[in-house]
Image (cartoon, helix red, strand yellow):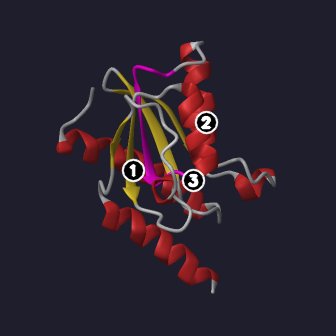
Amino acid sequence: MLTSINTHAYFMREALREAQKAFDADEVPVGAVIVCDEKVIARAHNYTERLTDPTAHAEMQVITAATNYLGAKYLSQCTLYVTLEPCMMCTGAIFWSQLAAIVYGAPDPKRGFLSRQNILLPKTIITGNILADDCSQLLTTFFKNKR
């Protein structure tokens, strides 16, 4: 399992690249990657505006891409890196896909899963606040431009 802060920062930068793609497409700038055996196997960002689909969050998109890549419905050997703490909907998908770990950037005290009852599998490792300032800054800039 990936635990090094340097490793977390490296893969969070990959997720930030995806978030920048969302920003550039006028989507809420959340990006995600899934890592297995220290290799990015899937990457995605929010597509809610483009697809007119409120469920097209980065986490949902990257889970689908990773399961397709592996040809399996469980991701029990994989780590999700996402720039924003997942919402409850995405946490449900994380639960069902049995991801081994979640590493997130910015906390989301209003909509994030940690502000509610933890519904993840007991063995799921949660690491937060990796490059949180970078992740938060992209979101802040996006919403400031919207106002």
Residue at screen point 45% across, 48% down:
82
The residue under the point 48% across, 76% down is 140
**Mark 1 or mark 3, earlier in chain:** 3
> What's the mark number on residue 104?
1
Eyeballing the image, is 62 above or below 54? above
Q: Secondary structure at mark 3?
A: loop
Amino acid type assigned to the residue bearing label 1 in the image: Tyr
Question: Can you see residue 123?
Answer: yes
- Residue 45 appears anywhere in the view: no
**Residue 138 placement, left or right of 126:** right
Q: Which residue is mark 2?
A: 93
Towards the viewer: 50 or 113:
113
Q: Which residues are magenta?
A: 75-86
Query: Which residue type does callout 3 highlight?
Result: Cys
**Residue 119 spot, x, y in % from top left:** 52, 41
Residue 137 locus on image (x, y percent):
40, 72
- Closest to the camera, between mark 1 and mark 3, is 3
Question: In which quarter of the view is residue 81 placed?
Answer: top left
Position of the C terminus, as image quadrant, is bottom right
